[in-house]
Image (tube, rainbow, N blue to C red):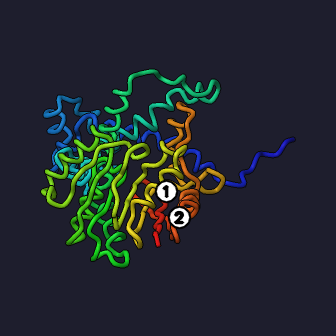
Amino acid sequence: MPSLPTQTQSFRPLHEIMISQIRSRLLQAGLSLGVFDLLGDFRTAGEAAAEMGAHARNLALFLDALANLGLVEKRDGRYRNSPLASEFLVSSSSLYLGPLLGMIKDASLTPLDDLEGLVRKGPHPPELGDGSSSECQWVESARASAPWALGEMGCRAARVVSGLPGFERFTKMLDLGGGHGLFALYFAQAGENLHAVVFDHAPVVELASELITAHGLGHKVSVIAGDYVKDDIGGDYDLIWASATFGPSKDHLETLLRKIHAALRPGGYFLSLHDGMTCEQTKPDMILEWLGGLLASGTDVRFEQGELAEAMLRCGFSSVRSRTLDTPLGAMDLDVARKL
């Protein structure tokens, strides 16, 4: 008679993987329904349902699930936002993440709707067009990703930059491929004599200009429109900063790094914040967000850990110091290169 099977390990991790999809759907639905905008103060599910025009019983079940995720607090049958939801999921908050989370959904989750087909048949055929849709995507991506730099990451990056030797003497810096330009705003605010320049494609720097004006820093931050691979990026900089911008330019990486080196003053710094794959391209968790786009496009814009640092040294930088930062989007590498 065969013996009953035994287990050498728990299948709990597999169950957690399956229900993680439910958590994602709950968050997406909460944003889509506008639930978090209604729960600034405690209220019953019936009160919220009346304002939303929703089904009271099902809304209560939905809010119970959001409470399980830590996005809603429940007390005596009444609901309100948790501190996390109040800060990041209410549309009137300056740190509202709705567009950023929506961009992650569109870029990372939606392509996986055809995951089996992509694995069996390969990437989708490239789309033909005049490039205008790409320009719109650049602007929308920059707008959606702005909350990533607001608050925590902007302050952390400014602390790193302001800790560089001689920072108090810096007078000019470049935010290369800066998109929304918010990192440049934080740096300019940290440096009493520092003027920052945001360089990106023309439609994108229009957005940066809006944000510069909105934060009252037009006297300390300006913009330059162009393609940093093809066009002049200026010069005489004490500092050049780049955040997650080099992936699409991998084929021109060394040309671009030599241009950056030439644009710095002697003793100047180049800082690059970017992904860095490890463990034979299986870590960090950020690779999961890249997967849908990689499968659909067939183009790999990721960097191995140390790949950019090694290229910096080949392109004339005298030293590079690297470290891994734990960011709200996962582990990222920061390379700090110096020009003699």
Q: Quadrant of residue 140?
A: top left
Residue 328 image offset from top left, x and y in percent: 39, 57
Q: State whether residue 32 appears in this view.
A: yes
Residue 97's place in the image compared with 235, above or below, is above
Residue assigned mark 1: 258
Q: Nearer the viewer, residue 24 or 256?
A: 256
Q: Residue at x 50, y 68 (%)?
A: 323
Residue type indicated by callout 1: Arg
Residue 247 image offset from top left, x and y in percent: 49, 46
Residue at the limit of the structure toward the right, as seen here? 1
Q: In the displayed structure, does residue 274 sit left or right of residue 68? A: right
Q: Residue at x 62, y 48 (%)?
A: 11
Residue type indicated by callout 2: Gly
Instruction: Answer few, some or many: residues within 10 Å of disc 1's Cα (few below 14, many 20 plus, some between 14 and 19).
Output: some
SS for tag 1?
Answer: helix
Q: Are marks 1 and 2 in contact (CB under 8 Å)?
A: yes
SS for tag 2?
Answer: loop
| Total marks in image | 2
Q: In the displayed structure, does residue 98 sit left or right of residue 265? A: left
Q: Residue at x 17, y 46 (%)?
A: 210
Q: Nearer the viewer, residue 200 or 101?
A: 200
Residue 169's place in the image compared with 238, above or below, is below
State how far apart marks 1 and 2 are (Cα).
Answer: 7 Å
Residue 159's place in the image compared with 249, above or below, is below
Residue assigned mark 2: 316
